Amino acid sequence: MEAVTPIVSFAGVFALGIIFAVLGAVKLRLAEILQVDDAQYGRLISTLMFASMIAVLIIGPLQDMLGYMPIGIVGFVAGGVCLWILAGVKSYGLALVACALLGVGAMCVNTIGNTLGPTVLFDGENPALAQNLLNVFFGIGGFLTPIFIGKFADKLGYQKTVSIIGAVVFALVVLVFLADFPEAAGDFELVASLGLLGTGAVLLGGLSLFCYIGLEVSMAGFVSTYLKDHGLTDEQANKGLSGFWIALIGGRVLAAFLLWVTALDVVYHAPIIPALGIAAAIVIYLMVVAATPKAGVVAAVLTGLVLGPIFPTVVGVTFFKSAAIEAGTAGSVFGWIFAMGLLGATLLPMLIGKLSAEGTIRQSMKAAVVVAVALVVISGILWLGVPEADPEEVIEVVAMAVRR
């Protein structure tokens, strides 16, 4: 059914929000079950991100070749099953394996959500607006997960609570069978996607996401620990984490509204991402210097508000400047830039976890401030130095990569 098709894209990013939030939401309980410190737990997050980084490089071009349906089926099924494994995990080694496999499911639902939506919403003419609307649902998934776990983990137990979350992700696969997807290009080769790295938009968009996704994943994974360090209880810390996700949703809703009422020339050529990067550096620094629990909560919530619009705007601007939708390379472009983003998400949580284990979680946030400053510089170059691409030129770049 054609009406179901856009719903699949929303379901994909919603499921991704659940998957990316779950390790942060269960951090305090799962670390206790596995008897691990912050550094070891940071490796769990990094394993999820590293596996996602490898998977998305393959899944993007595969979607361009095979279409949306097989990617969607694998994503929702694998996501649900891996969450069930995490629900019953007893050993650190099995948790690492589950996180690695969860990365594959995450990137399937991620790719279908973030490429199908900009293609079918607004006739494919406003990818930044589509991305911000879609990623509101990513935020909703991220917000509801810690709320649900905080409310029911004591009543139902850790295993049952996480199993229910896995069932929700698994059940979304029904939508894939009901949707009427656009046809796949069918002739796009895996090696062809290498040519896209030669375009400035893809390279700089990927480096921007390297900084941004590293920041978002680190905040989502360690905000509860940060607030616990301020003397809050487990329940209060999870509520603070939910506040972070609520603010992230609010930032994307606000951005979607502004993009709706603003002309495209302003949307794609204004310094939106550099400005948000500056704000991110400021509010994360406020987390470092917060002297009271209340100040810590406020700083964490402001961080979510500022970070919210950055990811969808970076993806939308990269699609626009690389002519990805018109050239039929959206899956591969998204695969490359998201893979670079996940490299940041692999390294930064590991670094923050290591610094936290050696010192304090608040002082470890200084590394995030440095990454936010890097985001300002890289996204500034994307804004100033990269013109909009011609779709035919993009196709020729891809063809040259195949001929080589």
Image: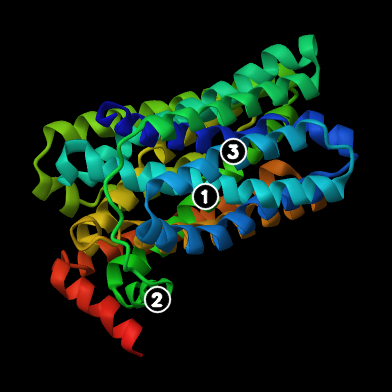
| Residue 164 screen position, x and y as percent | 67, 21
Q: Secondary structure at mark 1?
A: helix
Q: Local crowd at mark 1 within 10 Å, few (<14), some, or many (≥20)?
A: many
Question: In the displayed structure, would residue 69 be above or below residue 8?
Answer: below
Residue type pointed to by label 1: Met
> Could you give the CA–CA distance between mark 3 and mark 2, rounded to whole angstroms?
29 Å
Please give the residue where the numbered disc 3 appears in the rendered image.
77
Q: Is residue 29 left or right of residue 24?
A: right
Please give the residue where the numbered disc 2 appears in the rendered image.
194
Q: Nearer the viewer, residue 131 or 362?
A: 131
Residue type pointed to by label 3: Val
The disc placed on residue 107 is 1
> Could you give the CA–CA distance between mark 1 and mark 3, rounded to whole angstroms?
12 Å
The answer to whether one can see residue 210 in this image is yes
> Could you give the CA–CA distance between mark 2 and mark 1, rounded to whole angstroms?
19 Å
Q: Residue at x 16, y 32 (%)?
A: 260
Q: Residue at x 28, y 49 (%)?
A: 316
The answer to whether one can see residue 208 in this image is no
